[in-house]
Image (cartoon, coloured by chain):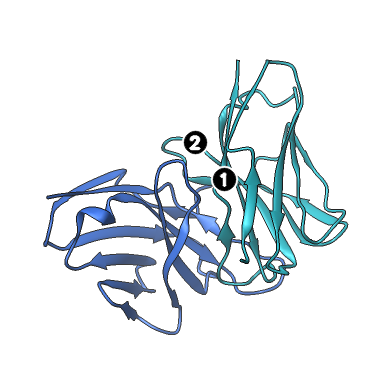
Chain colours: A blue, B cyan
Amino acid sequence: DQQVKQNSPSLSVQEGRISILNCDYTNSMFDYFLWYKKYPAEGPTFLISISSIKDKNEDGRFTVFLNKSAKHLSLHIVPSQPGDSAVYFCAAIIGTSGSRLTFGEGTQLTVNP
Amino acid sequence: DGGITQSPKYLFRKEGQNVTLSCEQNLNHDAMYWYRQDPGQGLRLIYYSQIVNDFQKGDIAEGYSVSREKKESFPLTVTSAQKNPTAFYLCASSMRTGNTEAFFGQGTRLTVV
């Protein structure tokens, strides 16, 4: 039962253009969503998050949008840079004690110079 | 320098042998986690611990065991009962379960030959 899904295993964009990574979830109890970035042979690092009471959160070049009715979130990177090439994981959590992060499968982003 | 440390980075073992992966954190976090990453499957939770001397099975606990004798340490043993042990293993910690952000170690690549 995959509660968090990233349907695109890979995405390729040109440097300077927008990258849009998508994530869908099925559990309506999730109330916090996060994006992690991972380089090969390294641990994931936290990128940006959004609470379910918001529909948008922005941090520099990164913006996360949340559509609760569609159970969908997306990460926008503008402008994309070659250093953004990595695997991006979407994660969700119910913010109560005992709960833990549930991750999607990841999307490999490649930004071409 | 606060952080979470996994060792070793690469580990080779013969089939049928148990092997223990180390995870140490000095972030004073109560919660610790073990994930496994396989291509196309994202991060899957093996075990997690909310507090010292307590741990719970995650989604794929079969063939693994853990202990949490100290707050700082959460070692994972991959036993001979684990059918496909070759993978990239990631340890993480957070202030508590249900906390919205987890910090990851650099990972251990285990190869069983």
Residue B14 location, x and y as percent? 68, 16
Q: How many marks?
A: 2
Q: CA distance from mark 1 to mark 2?
A: 9 Å
Q: Residue furthest bottom?
A: A53
| Residue corresponding to mark 1 | B44
Number of other residues with Cα within 10 Å of mark 1, as a class: few under 14, some 14 to 19, many 20 or more: many
- Say yes or no: labels 1 and 2 on the same chain: yes
Classify mark 1: helix, strand or loop.
strand
User: Crowding at label 2, few (<14), some or many (≥20) Cα neighbours within 10 Å?
Assistant: few
Badge 2 marks a residue whose secondary structure is loop
Snapshot quadrant of residue B31: bottom right
| Among numbered discs 1 and 2, the one appearing first in the sequence | 2
Kindly indicate whether the residue at mark 2 contacts the one at mark 1 (C-beta within 8 angstroms).
yes
Q: Position of residue B46 (x, y in %)?
A: 66, 44
Residue position marked by numbered label 2 in the rendering: B38
Eyeballing the image, is A64 above or below A104? below
Q: Quadrant of residue B101?
A: bottom right
Residue drawn at x 73%, y 31% is: B63
Label disc, if present, on residue A104 of the rendered structure: none
Residue B20 lies, in percent from the top left, at 74, 35
**B101 over B82 or under it: above or below:** below
Chain to which the residue tagged by mark 1 belongs: B
Quadrant of the frame with the C terminus of chain B: top right
Q: Position of residue A18 (x, y in %)?
A: 16, 63
Which is nearer the eye, B44 or B32?
B32
The disc labelled 2 sits on which kind of residue? Asp
Residue pictured at 72% horizontal, 34% vertical: B62
